[in-house]
Every structure is written in C-alpha cells, then in structure tokens.
Amino acid sequence: MLKDEQKRRDTAEYLRAYIARHMHHMSPEAISEELQVPLFAVKLHWPNPAR
C-alpha cells in the first residue's frame, strides 16, 4: 500500500472517530474549524440519520 493512501485512510479514520465522539455537542462547522479540515470532509463522514 502506498504511504499516501495509508495516510488518507488514517486521516479519514481519525475524522470519523472524532465526529463520533463530538457530534452530539458540536456542529459540522465547529468540527471543521477545530480540526482545520474542509467542511465537505466532515459532512462526508457525518452519520446520516436517514439510514
């Protein structure tokens, strides 16, 4: 596996874990600002209540 691919996977995993811990008291915008990641990345991993 390429190092870049592993880094992307680790980052996505970290983002998912952070969202799971903080989604109940932080908005996607606040998480985006806190982690310095684009808002679309946060929304991509945000749990979908419709599922």
Image (cartoon, rainbow, N blue to C red):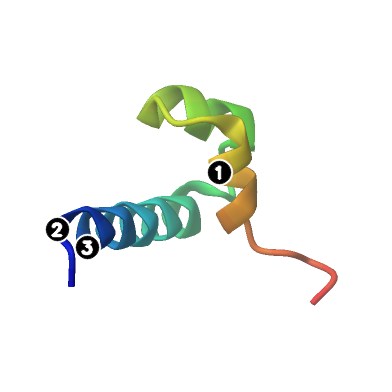
Mark 1 element type: helix
Residue 37 coordinates in the image, percent (x, y): 44, 31
Number of the label disc, if any, that sits on residue 6: 3
Q: Residue at x 47, y 47 (%)?
A: 22
Q: Seen in the image, is 20 located left or right of residue 51?
A: left
Look at the image and tell me in which quarter the C terminus lies: bottom right
Q: Earlier in the sequence, mark 2 or mark 1?
A: 2
Q: Is residue 5 above or below residue 30?
A: below
Q: Residue furthest right?
A: 50
Structural distance between the alpha carbons of marks 2 and 3: 5 Å
- Pointer 2 with pointer 3, Cβ within 8 A: yes
Mark 1: amino acid: Val
Structural distance between the alpha carbons of marks 3 and 1: 19 Å
Q: Which residue is mark 1?
A: 42
Q: Is residue 25 visible?
A: no
Query: Observer-nearest residue: 32 or 5?
Result: 5
Mark 2: amino acid: Lys
Q: Badge 2: how crowded within 10 Å, few (<14), some, or many (20+)?
A: few
Q: Residue at x 54, y 27 (%)?
A: 30
Q: Badge 3: how crowded within 10 Å, few (<14), some, or many (20+)?
A: few
Structural distance between the alpha carbons of marks 2 and 1: 22 Å
Q: Is residue 11 visible?
A: yes
Residue 42 coordinates in the image, percent (x, y): 55, 43
Residue 44 coordinates in the image, percent (x, y): 62, 52
